[in-house]
Amino acid sequence: MFGFEYIVSVFCSVIALSIKMPDMICFSLLFSFFVYYFYCFYIISFLLLSY
């Protein structure tokens, strides 16, 4: 579950950045959505390769 821990750490760092710089909230939201979709794509590709 290394990928899950990496995503959680990235998400926490994005939250910390948005708290420090409120004008970066939109960018951090877009970045978190990008990371979320990348993680979903990673899971789907891993499942497809495992078959």
Image (cartoon, helix red, strand yellow):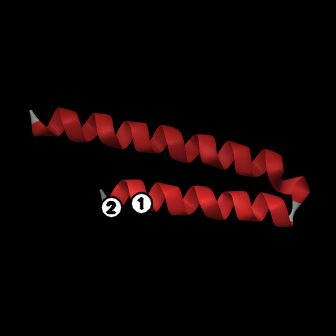
Q: Quadrant of the C terminus?
A: top left
Residue located beneath label 1 in the image: 5
Q: Image height check: is 41 above or below 22? A: above
- The amino acid type of the residue labelled 2 equals Phe
In the image, 4 versus 42, the foreground residue is 4
Answer whether labels 2 and 1 touch (C-beta < 8 Å).
yes
For the residue marked with disc 1, what is the amino acid?
Glu
Nearest the viewer among 26 and 9 is: 9
Left or right for 23, reference 50: right
Q: Secondary structure at mark 2?
A: helix
Q: Which mark is residue 2?
A: 2
Mark 1 Cα shell of 10 Å, populated few (<14), some (14-19), many (≥20): few
Disc tally is 2
Q: Is residue 50 above or below residue 17?
A: above
Q: Is residue 30 above or below residue 13?
A: above
Residue 21 figure quarter: bottom right
Task: Check residue 19 in the rendering and tell me which mark sits there, or answer none.
Answer: none
Residue in the picture at 82% in, 61% down = 19
Residue at (59% x, 55% y) in the render: 11
Query: Where is residue 45, by image quadrant?
Result: top left
Quadrant showing the N terminus = bottom left
> Residue 45 vs residue 51: left or right?
right
Q: Tag 2: Cα neighbours inside 10 Å, few (<14), some, or many (≥20)?
A: few
Image coordinates for residue 38, horizontal then vertical, percent: 46, 43
In the rendered image, residue 10, in percent from the top left (x then y), is placed at: 56, 60
Seen from the viewer's position, the closer of residues 45 and 9 is: 9
Q: In percent of the image, x 53 and y 63: which residue is there?
A: 9
**Residue located 41% across and 37% down the image:** 40
Callout 1: helix, strand or loop?
A: helix
> Is 33 on the left or on the right of 2, as rendered?
right
Kindly give the residue lying farthest to the right in the view shown.
23
Q: Position of residue 42 (x, y in %)?
A: 34, 43
